[in-house]
Amino acid sequence: MSDGMLGLTQLFLFLFFIMLGFPIAFTLMAMGLFFGYLGMQERIFDLLVQRTYAVMSNDVLISVPLFVLMGYIIERANILDRLFRSLQMASGNIPGSLAVATLATCALFATATGIVGAVVTLMGLLAFPAMLRAGYDVRLASGVICAGGCLGILIPPSIMLILFGATAGVSVVQLYAAAFIPGVMLAGLYILYAMGIALVKPQMAPRLPPEEVNIPFSQIAISLLTSFIPLAALIAMVLGAILMGLATPSEAAAMGSLGSIILAIVYRSFSFAKLKESVFLTARTSAMVCWLFVGSAIFSSVFGYLGGQDLVEQFFKSLPLNTFTFMILAQLLIFILGWPLEWTEIIVIFVPIFLPLLDDFGVDPLFFGVMVALNLQTSFLSPPVAMAAFYLKGVAPKHVRLEDIFKGCMPFIYIVIMCMLMIYAFPGLVTWLPDQLYGFTPSSGTPIQLDVPPEGGFQEDEVPRIAD
C-alpha cells in the first residue's frame, strides 16, 4: 500500500471509530500515532511532544477559556428569565411576539455564552412551555428555540470563530468583523420568518391576550433597563473593544469574565459555589478543546506526511471546478459531515483539508470561514444527529415528539441555506465591515504548521509553533 493510500486509510478508519462512539480527541491521537509509527518510525514521538507544546503555547487559544468562563457565569446569574420577560413585554403587539422575544433572547444569550446546549436547554425550560401555553404550534416553537440557540456559533464573540482563526491563521478580530453582519442578518431572517408565519397562519402563533399586551410603557422601560441593557452593554463593550482595536480577543475576554462576575453580583446571583462550578466547567471545556487541537495537529501532520493531503488536492484539482462549484462542493461536504459530527471536530479535522485549496480556487479564507460558520448552524439542526433537537427533547414535555422537533427545525435549515446564497451573491456583506474598520481584507491565511520532525528530532530552539 502506498503512503498516500495509507493516509486515506487513516482518515476512513478515524471516521469508522468515531461512528462507534470513541472519544474524538484520543481517537485522533491514536490514529496519528499508529499510522505515524508506520510511516515515520520513532520520529512520531518527537512530533507528539512538539505538537502538544505548540498548541499549548498558542496565544490565540487563551481567549477560549476566558470566553467560556464568561458564558458559564452569565448562565448561572439567573438573568435569562428577566431578559425573556422584558423582551416579551416589549414585543407584545408584534405578530408572533413570543417567538420574536424567544429569538431575540436566544440571540443575545447565545452571544454571551456561546454554549448551544446551555441556551437551548434553558430556553426549553423557560420559553417553550410559555409558547405551548399560548397555543403555539409545537413544530414552530421547537424550531425557534433550536435555531435561536445555535446563533452563538456565528455571532461574535464566537468560540467557533476563535478555533477557525487558530486553525486557518486568520485574524480573529477580522473574523469577528466579517461575521457580525451575517450573524445579525440570520437572526433577522429567523424573526421575519416567525412573524410571517404568525401573519399567514395565525393559528400556529396566536396573539397574546390583552392583559399580557397592554402593559404601561414605564413598566416595559424599567424592565428593559434592568435586564436587557446590562447584558447588551457587556456584550457591546467586549465586542466593541475587539473590533475597534482597543483590546485583543484575550484581553476583551478577560474583561468580559470580570464584567460577568460584576453582573452576577449586581443581580445578587453570585456565590463561591457557582463560581467554583463555572471554573470547573470552564476547565473541562477548555481541556477538551486543547486536546482536540493536539489530536488534530498530530493526525493532520501524519496525514500530510503520508501524502493523504496531496491525494485530496489532486482529486479536487482533477475535477472541472471553478470558484463557485468548489465552494458548493466544499460546503456540501461540510453540511453532510454535520450529520454525524459536531462543529468542533469539523473545524479542527476536516476544514484544514480544504485550506490549502483556497488559494488555488481564489477563495478568501475570511469569506470561507464565515460561510463555514453559517453552514455549521445546520450541524445542530439537521437529523439524524441534530444535537439542538436532542437538547430540547431532554427538557420538553413528554407529549412533544422528537419527530415534531425535527420537522420544526427544517424551515430554519432552509433559511440558513438561503442566507448562505445571499452572502455568496453579495460578498460585501462579509467584507464591508472589515474593510471599513481595518482598510483591508486578508487574501490568504497561514494554516497550522504541520512540520514533520527531521531525523533526530527538533532542537530546543526549533520548536514549531502554530501561527498566531
Image: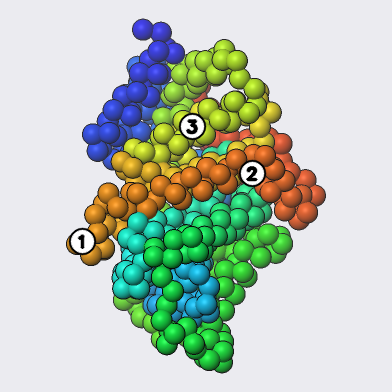
Residue that mark 1 sits on: 399
Res. 445 in view: yes
Front residue of this view, candidates 144 and 304: 144
Please tell me whether mark 2 sits on a helix, a strand or a loop.
helix
Q: Quadrant of residue 120?
A: bottom left
Relative vertical location of residue 31 with respect to residue 83 in this rendering, above or below = above
Residue type, mark 1 in image = His
- In-image side of 245 versus 226 (left or right): right
Residue 77 placement: quadrant: bottom left
Q: Earlier in the sequence, mark 2 or mark 1?
A: 1
The numbered dot on residue 423 is 2
Q: In which quadrant is the C terminus drawn?
A: top right
Callout 3: SS: helix
State the image coordinates of residue 152 (x, y, percent, origin top left).
Answer: 49, 57
| Mark nearer the N terminus (1 vs 3) | 3
- The one nearer the camera, 466 or 313, is 313
Q: Residues within 10 Å of mark 2 (few under 14, many from 20)?
A: some
Q: Which residue is mark 3?
A: 332
Mark 1 residue element: loop
